[in-house]
Image (tube, rainbow, N blue to C red):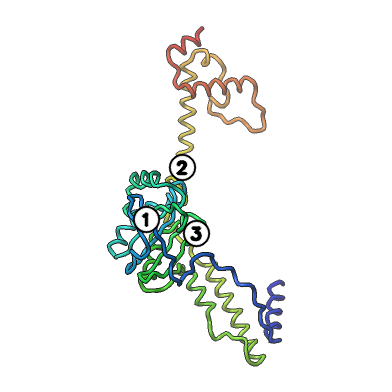
Amino acid sequence: MKSSLLRLFLLAFVLLGGTPASADAPAALTGPQIGQPAPAFHLRTIDGKDVSLDAYRGKTLVVNVWATWCPPCRLEMPDLIATAPKLAKAGVAVLGVDTTEEAPIVRAYVSAKGVPYPQAIDAGKTFSNAYDVQYFPTTYVIDPQGVLRARYIDVIAPAQLNALVAAANRGENGSIVSPLQAKVDATLGDSTIVFDGESAAREANAKKAEAAIAAARSCSRTATPPAVTRRICCGPALKKRPCATRRSRRSALRERHCRMRRSCRVCAAMPHSTASSGRRRSKRTMPSSRSIQERRRAQRHRDVGEPSRTAREGCRR
């Protein structure tokens, strides 16, 4: 019902010669803009050397703004360490910039991780203010002519970085478009759909636009989810243990519990609870005080481990 009303409203709106009201355009990112000359900077590396944007003129420059305390920055660091030598062979320079820490901290982290590219310290916040650094990590790609071609705010993958560098080498602004997005854009980018002319032409174009929207939705619904190419947490990926392994582990713990009970004469003389005998107790029945005591005794046995001879002698007393 709603889709029918929406279709009728669209057709009536087009036939009446209406034009969509111009919505406010989204605000552009503050700071340096893509396609404009990158702001000049003068920094000092952790080795005491001076670096500037003019020193990299003639080659593509990748500037990665990061911090040692930033978990996403530490997450992307292994990829940058592996990618930087490959980019260097292609004539691309990589520069790390830390805007929040002092040189000794960065020097210790870089030496421990074996970072191969130089690191600069933005002590006076000149770089941070000029490039409007608000998030960590942020990666800038500057082409050989000193024009900013990409500004990426997130953990950047090697394939994404290579795509941005390739666009900068061609003198183009970098953009990351997935195959699905390209297909949807091609479906919706029919230049023949115009809402000018007679009413019949407008009605026909409205139907074509509706068909294009339906095709784009179909592409999105039938798309295969992309494979995960990078970790999404700082630690190693946690693998779920199979159910059979979990069951075998519970069985092993139950058998160990029974062995500990048999090793203690006092415990062995007491009647076994349903938990120690391996039978499941119904969830509806309330545990007795004796079973609670036995659980606590079993927990103490598990914490201490297999009862020693001294423990068994103590149980005899």
Q: Disc 1 marks which residue?
A: 80
For the residues marked 3 and 2, what is the alpha-carbon distance in whole angstroms?
48 Å
Q: Which residue is painted at 54% across and 20% down in the image?
A: 297
Secondary structure at badge 3 equals helix
Residue 191 visible in the shown view? yes
Answer few, some or many: residues within 10 Å of disc 3's Cα (few below 14, many 20 plus, some between 14 and 19): few
Earlier in the chain: of badge 1 and badge 2, it is 1
Answer few, some or many: residues within 10 Å of disc 2's Cα (few below 14, many 20 plus, some between 14 and 19): few
Q: Nearer the viewer, residue 93 or 265?
A: 93
Placement of 101 over or under 305, stated as above or below: below
Secondary structure at badge 2 equals loop
Circle nearer the viewer, 3 or 2: 3
Q: Disc 3 marks which residue?
A: 129
Circle nearer the viewer, 1 or 3: 3
Q: Disc 2 marks which residue?
A: 241
Q: Which residue lies furthest to the bottom in this view?
A: 198
Which amino acid type corresponds to the residue marked 1 in the rendered image? Leu
Q: Quadrant of residue 53?
A: bottom left
Which amino acid type corresponds to the residue marked 2 in the rendered image? Arg
Earlier in the chain: of badge 1 and badge 3, it is 1
**Mark 1–mark 3 contact, CB under 8 Å?**
no
Which amino acid type corresponds to the residue marked 3 in the rendered image? Asn
Earlier in the chain: of badge 3 and badge 2, it is 3
Secondary structure at badge 1 equals helix
For the residues marked 1 and 3, what is the alpha-carbon distance in whole angstroms?
24 Å
Placement of 307 over or under 78, stated as above or below: above
Placement of 129 over or under 70, stated as above or below: below
Q: In the rendered view of the protein, which quadrant contains the N terminus?
A: bottom right
Which label is found at residue 143?
none
Q: Nearer the viewer, residue 211 or 228?
A: 228
Residue 144 in the image, given as x and y percentages of width and height: 35, 70
Placement of 16 over or under 282, stated as above or below: below
